[in-house]
Amino acid sequence: MIDETPKGDLEPKLEKTEIVFQKEGKGEADFNDRLIVSQIAAGQKDLFRLLVRRHEKAVYGMGMSFFRNHEDASDFTQEVFLKVFRSLSRFEGRSRFSTWLYKIAYNTALNEVNRKKEYQSLAEEDTEKLVNNNDTPERTVLRNAASTAVRAAIEELPERFRICIDLFFFYDRSYQEIEAITGIPVNTIKSHVFRAKILLKEKLESFVEN
């Protein structure tokens, strides 16, 4: 999707270096991110492409939410990773690497987005794009019901708070991480996520009853 080699004075020389990670849990993913960052800091700048591969889809998804077209979302993704590469030495490890990355992406989007275009949640994407081809019909229906419930919750929120729902449900961020990314107070985030959970529960219960 994007050129994985950062541009500019810090451009790394690509070498044949490969690290392959098996299926990861949340803690393992962050550990592996930190491992890659530490190796980049030690001089293996070619490993930055691994960070791009691990997080490109999430950053691109955020770009699509803000810009609503492939070209702008791709340019946004390229810019975010360029900023991440140039700022990597400032990552202090106080949060998950992905949280630090999403904060850079979020701030970049806010600075660049055309204010006339509204933020659109990932839940508002066509349901076909959210369906795994390996899902059973029952799981597909449940997934669509969940997406509808989250969309209903999002429609009740002011535009600037909709990102909270995305970060919680689609990016697996904690309340504290969402606050760190967006600057929105934790209690405000909790109230919006709580409302979304209620609507989600009601929608799924209606599905089960039917």
Image: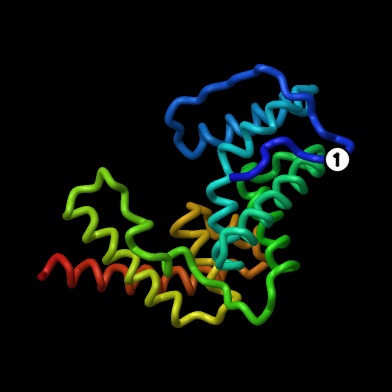
Q: Position of residue 125 (x, y in %)?
A: 42, 65
Using the image as rendered, state which of residue 189 and residue 102 is in the foreground. 102
The residue closer to the viewer here, 198 or 1, is 1
Q: Which residue reaches farthest top? A: 16
Residue 14: percent from left, percent from top: 73, 24
- Residue at image position (75%, 22%) is 44
- The amino acid at mark 1 is Gly
**Residue 134, horizontal then vertical, whole percent:** 26, 43
| Vertical arrangement, residue 158 with respect to residue 65, above or below | below
Q: Quadrant of residue 197?
A: bottom left
Query: For the C terminus, which image quadrant?
Result: bottom left
Q: Where does residue 149 sit, x and y in percent of width and height?
A: 33, 71
Residue highlighted by disc 1: 8
Q: Quadrant of the N terminus?
A: top right
Where is 163 relative to 56, above or below?
A: below
Q: Is residue 77 visible?
A: yes
Q: For the residue carrying disc 1, how many other residues have a C-alpha within 10 Å: few (<14), some (14-19), or many (20+)?
A: few
* Quarter occupied by residue 63: bottom right
Q: Is residue 175 above or below residue 57?
A: below
Asked if residue 33 is positioned above or below residue 191 in the image, the reply reads above
